[in-house]
Structure formats: C-alpha cells, structure tokens
Image: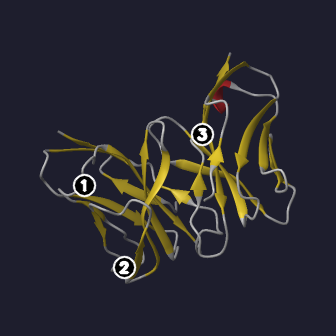
Amino acid sequence: KQEVTQIPAALSVPEGENLVLNCSFTDSAIYNLQWFRQDPGKGLTSLLLIQSSQREQTSGRLNASLDKSSGRSTLYIAASQPGDSATYLCAVHPGANSKLTFGKGITLSVRP
Amino acid sequence: DGGITQSPKYLFRKEGQNVTLSCEQNLNHDAMYWYRQDPGQGLRLIYYSQIVNDFQKGDIAEGYSVSREKKESFPLTVTSAQKNPTAFYLCASSIGGFNSPLHFGNGTRLTVT
C-alpha cells in the first residue's frame, strides 16, 4: 500500500529565504506526483504535476523535482514571501485506474 | 470564470438527520470526486465518478451516498449512518481521471451535534 509522508508538519522561515519542502513515498512505481497549496478554510490549488517520466517541473518561483528510485519529491520555493504562507500537500498517483494518495501536508509560515 | 462551486460553506445539522452537500462545476470535466479532510489525517476519498450515471466507492464510502445525473453536478449525501460526520468536505473534478490535475472547490464545513 502506497504511503506518502511529509516532514516536518510545520515550518516557519523569514521572508526572502529559499526553501525546500519534502515529500516521500514508499512505492516507486508511480504514474505522477502533484503538489497542491491549501489556504486556511479553502480548497486545494494544483501547483505542479510531474509525470513519472519527468525529473522536474517549474512554475514561476516554484520548482518541483521527482526522484522515483529514492521515493522522493521536493518543492523548491525561491525568495519566499508572506503570501506563500499556506499548507502544501503532495499526492501520488500509483497508476492507471488507481486513486491518488495524499500526504498530510506541510504548513508553511513566512515571517515578514 | 470556470470553476467548482460548493455550497453552503458552513452547514450545521442535528445528529440523526441526513444532509446533502452541493457540488457544481462548469469546467466541462468528466470526472468528479468527493474527499473528506480531518485534522491530522489528510484527504480521504469518499466517492468518485468518471462519467455521468456512474460512480465508485472510495476508501471511506460507508454512511455516504452520491448521484451523478448531470455532468455538472455531483451531490453528496451524508446519512445518519455516518458515525463521525463532522468534517471539512472537498469536491474536485478533472478532465479525465486521476492522471489529470485536480481542481478543487472551496469546501463545505459540516458540523453535526
């Protein structure tokens, strides 16, 4: 059974720092991996989707990498801003006709 | 603007009553999903539908029911059989299954007392 882990559960950094959020999964046979952002009391917003054949995806200040063999993905946020404060979740798609498995998320606080 | 609308944002019910949560999308997506989010537990899949008039149970379907009579709509009924219904419920859709990016609504917070 696929398990997705995000550690630490919470992170606080000063504005301007470059930071890395980690996501690990137990079964390397995945179809794709998605990173989401969730603001308090709101739904999830898809940030990046990495197919299993890709190594990374970039969108603005965000860069997500995927290393299937080690069961890891990282979300890199450059020059963090207070507006980046939110919970970041990763989700793994094990394969065709399978369901997404979500991590519990990392709650990020960027201090002005 | 295209998107997913969940209503109401907050819902309060007495124990023993059934309650229906609304989810409407105008993205022309075939697939729709219902998730439940509890503190410290992440998202868990309740039901999903890949096409109109068809739906499948997710990981925690007991005590819930759904219908998919129209492409745009996927209502979720929380029945009195659901032992712990108080939670944050999220509806999502995608163009074609789990391989496509999921688009989420803003959720309904249900409180049952």
Kindly report the distance in space between the C-alpha atoms of the residues bearing marks 3 and 2.
33 Å
**Do marks 1 and 2 both belong to one polypeptide chain?**
yes
Q: Chain of mark 1?
A: B
State the residue position of label 3: A105
Of the two numbered discs 1 and 2 on the same chain, state the one appearing first in sequence.
2
Which quadrant does the C terminus of chain B fall into? top left
Q: Give how far apart the Cα atoms at labels 1 and 2 are.
A: 25 Å
User: Badge 2: few (under 14), some or many (20 or more) residues near its Cα, within 10 Å?
Assistant: few
Label 3 element class: loop
Counting from the top left corner in percent of width and height, residue A50 is at 77, 59
Residue beneath the point at 37% across and 84% down: B53
Q: Residue under label 1, please give it.
A: B82
Secondary structure under badge 2? loop
Please give the name of the residue rendered at 44% of the width and 61% of the height, measured from the top-left corner: B59
Three-letter amino acid code at the position of disc 2: Lys
Residue appearing at x 80%, y 23% in the figure: A17
Cα distance between the residues tagged 1 and 3: 26 Å
Q: Farthest front residue?
A: A1
Q: Quadrant of residue B98?
A: bottom right
Considering only vertical position in the picture, is A26 above or below B25? above
Same chain for mark 3 and mark 2? The answer is no
Where residue B26 appears, as percent x and y from the top left, is 47, 68
